[in-house]
Image (tube, rainbow, N blue to C red):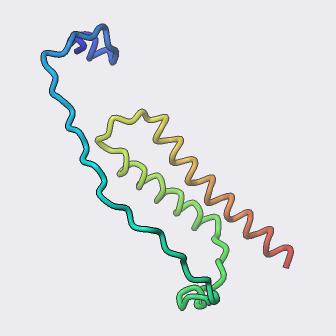
Amino acid sequence: MPNETDRKKGRIGGIRSSASTSGVKKTGAISTVEETKKASAVSGIRATGAASSLRATRFISMAERAQLFEMIHEEADKLFSGKNVPPQHKEIVEQAVKMTIDAASLLEEEKKKKE
């Protein structure tokens, strides 16, 4: 176990031997294994009800984008509050979410231009 000084510095200075150990329980034997059965073939694929009612994604304005990014920042604050996470890690996660949204927007714009 690390001493208190090392614990405060976030490092381990040494390890002491354990006081006692306990045995490991043995697992029981497997009595039987059922034979695998052949699966039936796929007969067809249909759209689900929810997928058939999807509508096209709309573009968001710069003001909506700014509002969305502010919400992402607030949610990141909530997610990481009270946790022992360095601010750099919070920033990395926040930026990754924002980059994903921007990338999806760019892909959607390119898709619309090709149509």
Q: Quadrant of the C terminus?
A: bottom right
Identity of the residue drawn at 86% across and 74% down: 114
Q: Residue at x 58, y 54 (%)?
A: 98
Quadrant of the rendered image containing residue 42: bottom right
Where residue 96 appears, as percent x and y from the top left, is 58, 49
Judge left or right: residue 32 versus residue 103.
Answer: left
- Tell me if residue 104 comes above or below residue 74 in the rendering: below
User: Measured along the vertical axis of the image, is residue 1 above or below residue 102?
Assistant: above
Q: Which quadrant of the structure image shows residue 6?
A: top left
- The residue most toward the front is 31
User: At 60% from the left edge and 90% from the top edge, which residue is drawn?
Assistant: 52
Compared with 79, 62 (above or below) is below
Frontmost residue, 14 versus 77 = 14
Q: Position of residue 34 (x, y in %)?
A: 39, 67
Q: Position of residue 45 (x, y in %)?
A: 63, 87
Asked whether 57 or 23 is in front, the reply is 23
Screen quadrant of the N terminus: top left
> In the image, 22: left or right of 59?
left
Give x and y (percent) for residue 92.
53, 41
In this rendering, the count of numbered labels is 0
Q: Is residue 15 left or right of residue 66?
A: left
Q: Nearer the viewer, residue 89 or 50?
A: 50
> In the rendered view, would you say 94 is above or below 69?
above
Q: Residue at x 80, y 68 (%)?
A: 110
- Residue 79 relative to residue 70: left or right: left
